[in-house]
Image (spheres, rainbow, N blue to C red):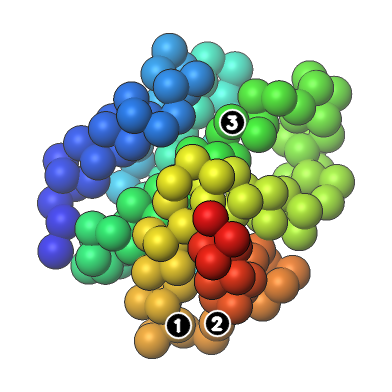
């Protein structure tokens, strides 16, 4: 099981090596617990930076699976930084983006492009042992990730 400090260290290493455009951003890691959290990780845009909420259950996953989920969330931050101010304000005001499915799939694609395809697949495999598998509306499926890995 990962400790919170180990999780933060993994995040710092992944940012430094694979998401350098985030190195200058203020990112706060908030660890949460409880059944009211229906995610393993989530990002929140703030005017002065970002928060990454990490549900403590994911600390029980393998380091590789944790890293795959983290890379997906960091990809959201990169994609978010490319979005217009109006797009961000819309997301904040409504609590949703204009196309959540596309956002999730694009985050997966960027994570794979940055070298985290195997880790993302490992996350899906460990997730699916305990929960219903992700479907195509929630991001890339295991089959799609495997197909992408074969192309690399």
Give the mark nearest the N terminus, 1 or 2.
1
User: Quadrant of the rendered structure where residue 138 is?
Assistant: bottom right
Which residue is under mark 3? 78
Which numbered dot is residue 57? Answer: none
The residue shown at (16%, 44%) is: 6
Q: Earlier in the sequence, mark 3 or mark 2?
A: 3
For disc 2, the marked residue is 133
Q: Nearer the viewer, residue 118 or 56?
A: 118
* Residue holding disc 1: 128
Crowding at mark 2 (Cα within 10 Å: few <14, some 14-19, many 20+): some
Q: Are marks 1 and 2 in contact (CB under 8 Å)?
A: yes
Locate residue 33, reporting x and y percent.
Answer: 33, 60
Relative placement, left or right, of 65 versus 40 is left
Cα separation, mark 3 vs mark 2, equals 26 Å
Q: Secondary structure at mark 2?
A: loop
The residue shown at (52%, 63%) is: 149
């Amino acid at each position: 099981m990962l400790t919170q400090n180990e999780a933060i260290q993994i995040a710092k290493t992944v940012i430094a090596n694979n998401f350098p455009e985030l190195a200058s951003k203020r990112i706060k890691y908030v660890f949460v617990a409880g059944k009211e959290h229906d995610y393993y990780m989530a990002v929140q845009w703030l005017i002065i930076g970002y928060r990454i909420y990490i549900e403590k259950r994911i600390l029980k996953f393998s380091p590789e699976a944790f890293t795959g989920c983290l890379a997906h969330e960091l990809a959201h931050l990169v994609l978010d930084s490319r979005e217009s101010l109006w797009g961000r304000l819309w997301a904040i005001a409504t609590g949703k983006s204009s196309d959540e499915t596309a956002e999730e799939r694009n985050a997966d694609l960027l994570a794979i492009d940055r070298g985290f395809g195997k880790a993302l697949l490992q996350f899906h495999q460990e997730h699916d042992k305990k929960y219903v598998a992700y479907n195509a509306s929630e991001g890339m499926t295991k089959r799609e990730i495997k197909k992408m890995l074969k192309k690399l």
